Image (cartoon, rainbow, N blue to C red):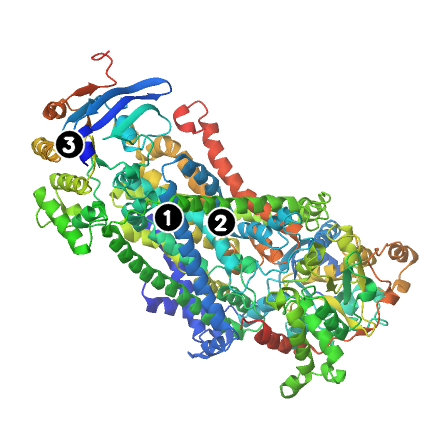
Amino acid sequence: MLRFFPAFALFILVVPVLCGLAGTMLPAFGYLPALGGDEINLSAYKALFSQPGIGHSTRQAFIIGLASTAISVCLVAGFVAAWYGTRSFRATQHLVSPLLAVPHAAAAFGFAFMIAPSGYLARLLSPWLTGWDRPPDLLIVNDPVGLALIAGLVVKEVPFLLLVTLAALPQVPAVKAIHLTQSLGYGRMAGFIFAVWPSIYKQIRYPIFAVIAYSSANVDMSIILGPSTPHTLPVRLVGWMNDSELSMRFMACAGASLQIAVTVGGLVAWLLIERLMASCLRMFTTAGYRLKRDGWLRIMASISMTASALIVFGGLVVLAIWSIAGLWQFPNALPNSLSLRSWNTTLPALTRPFWTTVVLGIAAVIISVFITIACLAREQQTGRSGGNRALLFLYVPLLVPQIGFLFGLQLLLLNFNASASWPALIFVHVVFVLPYVFLSLSAPWRAFDTRYEAIAAALGTSPWRIFLRVRFPMLLRAILAAAAVGFAVSVGQYLPTLLIGSGRFSTITTEAVALGSGGNRRIIGIYAFVQMMLPFIGFLLASLLPALFFRNRRAIKGL
Amino acid sequence: MDKTAIHGLRLKDVTITLDGRELVSVDHTILPGEILTVMGPSGSGKSTLLAFIGGFLDPAFHAAGEVYCGDINITSIKPQDRRAGLLFQDPLLFPHMSVGSNLMFALPNWVQPKAKRRQSAEEALADVGLDGFFDRDPDTLSGGQKARVALARVLISEPAFLLLDEPFSKLDAGRRNQMRQLVFGNAKSRSLPVLLVTHDQADADATGGMIIEVGAPLQNQ
Amino acid sequence: MSLKSIIVALATGVASIIATQSAIAEPDVKDWPAVLKEADGQTIYWNAWGGSAQINAYIEWVGDTLAEAHNIDLVHVKLDDTANAVATVVAEKAAGKDQGGAIDLIWINGENFASMKRQQLLFGPDWATQLPNWQYVDVENKPTIVTDFTIPTDGMESPWGMAKMVFFHDSARSDVKSMPDSADDLLKWAEQNPGRFSYPQPPDFIGSSFLKQVLIEKVADRSVLLEPVDDATFKQVTAPLFDYLDQLHPNLWRQAKAFPKDYPSMSQLLADGEVDITFAFNPADASRGIANQELPDTVRSFTFSGGTLGNTHFVAIPYNASAKAAALVVADFLISPEAQARKQDPNIWGDPTVLAIDKLDADNAAMFAKLDLGIATLKPEELGPSLDEPHPTWMSKIEQEWASRYGIAN
């Protein structure tokens, strides 16, 4: 029974992506009989490339994807190099990590609320410092170059990359290597980058690739922070896919294939950058430069890391304040009055999306945890972990741009009359939740001391009972933590919910983005607040429940 | 270099405590070519002395006293400027660099140009009996060979003194003796003061120097 | 799985369209008790723009009321663009899904209605004028109720509210006498007050309406706008509009490098003091904003003496709706005096009624009479003349032209 699960997991991770890609590519070349496309032709591409500003939108998606990834990687590498093993490292790490659970849209709103000309930072400094009694006419959010979007993506990707880096660090004798390089006279950062970083980098390549794929094809953050004249390619694609002109769908699919090309191009460019950096690093490594004076750089790394976290947290607090604000004029740092009116008018409308989000998340998490445990149990039976190749499969749904296969998947499901149904929606969430659950749970599962099971087996316990009475309770913390990660991922899904749910299933996230593109800060505040609280509650339960179950067992209660 | 040769490594009233509990207390000058051994069971805190001298003491510990290298007080200067040569029980060769790059990485940067750097590294390898290993992947070396590369790497960096943290404990018995002689011989011939931390009596005996025992109340106090 | 077998599977899947389903009898509007009976227990998916919390709350109230009165479960599918709902119906028709569609009711007018009517995607024929509450509708004085952007409604959409473009400014910052009285005035005003005016980025409904307002004022012969657009003369007819925009844009907020996304974003800009003039299609919106503490109580309304755009917004039922009976009941409830009076209350929404007060009985008329339209709302006689909407084909063409001129970075 167990042995079918690895194949099943593979099926879930790969088949929707492949079918979706095929379902996108066929219409891109004019073939979609349901919409009257019976022959293969290039007219969709002709239409696509005649769109005004298409080259600009495409270039931007490419540049924004690469730039935000490069900055995030540099920031994480620099910060770890500067502070790993110190107390302030741990403090900052604890500050940054919770950001991982904040959905992209909420983080983007919080960020925008801080940095806009009428945002909180300007309010704090006005008018006493800036002399502004009205917001300055500065183009900060939605700037044509996409700087705000890049910054927003960086702020959100840094916690993710930091987390995977932290997971990779124990595989390397980092602290000793730092001491060694320092006693050889190297500056702290230089020593780390020369001696430790290459080994770390090898382990975090796939996550970095996933970041490139995400940030080059991202829709929700781009709607909120990105340029609007024109919008980036992914945002325009979603617009075309939803256009009332049917012929636009062919073009949207052609555009989706262009998006895939952009992402692949981004990955290829990254591989080239990798090569270049590696040979630069090799040259510097043996040249003997010690680069001792890195004090200012270390402080910069610390400041930018702390600032990026604080600005989002600050933004989230500001969001929460806006949700209960009465009139709040510039440049007041606090609202003139407080009012629960927005909550009162919004709460009734919030109920249905709230429960949709919760049910969807829980269903997707239960299925994903079940499949993950079954696969890991099978791996334990056979003693084969599938190695790096299996890991690549896990990353498939994260490496292919969502738009690239969701369009096709939507068209397919529509033709099978299966779109906008609970099973379809849960299924597509599992596709994205499963990799994260698997990645979170596999490490603690594999690290489990099997001697406990050996003891139980020697006592004549059946394998099923061993799992239920020994491994499961001992790994409950890890399982719940993985479930919380999965739930947070599900809550944050925008495009899959929007496209596969055909708008009939609205979650807090789809509502937040739909409403948030409008400017009502109070409503954005409410939705972003709820959107942020859901994963938080998930993590809270994941840490409290084991403590409750095992309140008399100090070794595993964890609090 | 010359001053060190005259004065050695001086540990002046060095005391390391954790939560008020004394772990190590030393007042001793290690003369050039001399080896001071700190012995104690694992967890006794003997490595903290080494960390203190190297400049890596965890802030949880409290240290008093001063360390002089020659006549320079190095107690509060940065680890980068202390010129300590570190050897751990793991060779810690950087896996992404070739054997030669590992050495060139350690070589001071005033040795230039590139060709000269390479030559120095090749000579250092020859000194430890590893001629022609320059382009090898460290991962393909035996445990003993790795240990010798680590030694060559620390020596090529021209340290002012050596700090050895159980450097032989992971070698098999035959190699261990060979390696001891290689390390101690090199230290003597280069007139380097050496601090050795170990829990192996044979290590201590091989040094022929002074032994301080820590964290072993039954034998000591 | 080989690529070939995937393609084969896909092609069969795409080709196998469920086409044949037994026809179910359509509800008969004339037999209202039967409609009510059929609607009992139905779930209705109402696709309506969801960008305004007040409107969402109003729709929620409609749902609650109908759940109690007729056991109808109303789901508000919040759209950011009504075109998305049209797209869904189009896709369903293409896929042969002639029954059991995803959408039961659409908040609609203008080009979306024209598009659905042309493509025969609407439930019909005439059902709107058969609704019990139709008797109160002010057909006589409000011509846009039966002619939506020059297109006859033919009873295939039922009116919900009236719209008239009005402008807002903050009297604490600027004097009402200094406010512009025409598009040309506005251009001059923007030159004197650079960075203090903007409009939502077309194809946003409000933003596109601004373009239409300017076009109507600047066009040589207004009558051509009532006919479908002619590609041959488009450039020449719209030249004054784009000349105007070319002059206006350098003086817009952010030098027109970015635009507010929609009306609520623009309204927030007024509250923050980033812009000095905004406009809306709901004459009471400033009062609503003040009542909701979104705008300072010094905001006031003004309009152009030469007239501003006016139109009506409606609800329509897709031809393949799953819950037509419930959709009819909702449409009827929306034109009930109770629902219309609540909608006109600026504390709730402030949207002007489609009903004729003199057709109501005394109690219902009193409901409207006692509404305080709010400090910032102009009286009906102050609203000025209403300009007719151009034929819907103009809008999409203008939006395209706008996008290729200003919607891309140069």
Residue C209 or residue B70, whichever sits in front: B70
Where is A347 relative to C146, above or below?
Answer: above
- Marks 2 and 1, the one that precedes in the sequence: 1
Label 3 and label 1: CA atoms lie apart by 33 Å
- Residue A207 badge: none
The nearer-to-camera label among 2 and 1 is 1
Give left or right: position of C146 versus B142. right
Q: Are marks 2 and 1 on the same chain?
A: yes
Q: Secondary structure at mark 3?
A: loop
Residue A96 or residue B100, whichever sits in front: B100
Where is C49 relative to B202, above or below?
Answer: below
Label 2 and label 1: CA atoms lie apart by 28 Å
Q: Amino acid at mark 1?
A: Ala
Residue B193 appears in the picture as rendered: no
User: At which x and y percent is residue C315?
Assistant: 71, 65
**Which chain contains the residue that carries disc 2?**
A
Q: Residues within 10 Å of mark 3 (few under 14, many from 20)?
A: many
Q: Are marks 3 and 2 on the same chain?
A: no
Which residue is the site of mark 2?
A490
Residue B7 appears in the picture as rendered: yes
User: At which x and y percent is residue A119?
Assistant: 62, 51
Which residue is the site of mark 3?
B168
User: At which x and y percent is residue C331?
Assistant: 74, 62
Which residue is the site of mark 1?
A77
Residue A236 or residue C359, whichever sits in front: A236
Counting labels gives 3
Single out the residue that lies furthest toward the bottom: C232
The residue positioned 66% from the left and 61% from the top of the image is C49
Q: Residues within 10 Å of mark 1 (few under 14, many from 20)?
A: many
Residue A146 or residue B127, whichever sits in front: B127
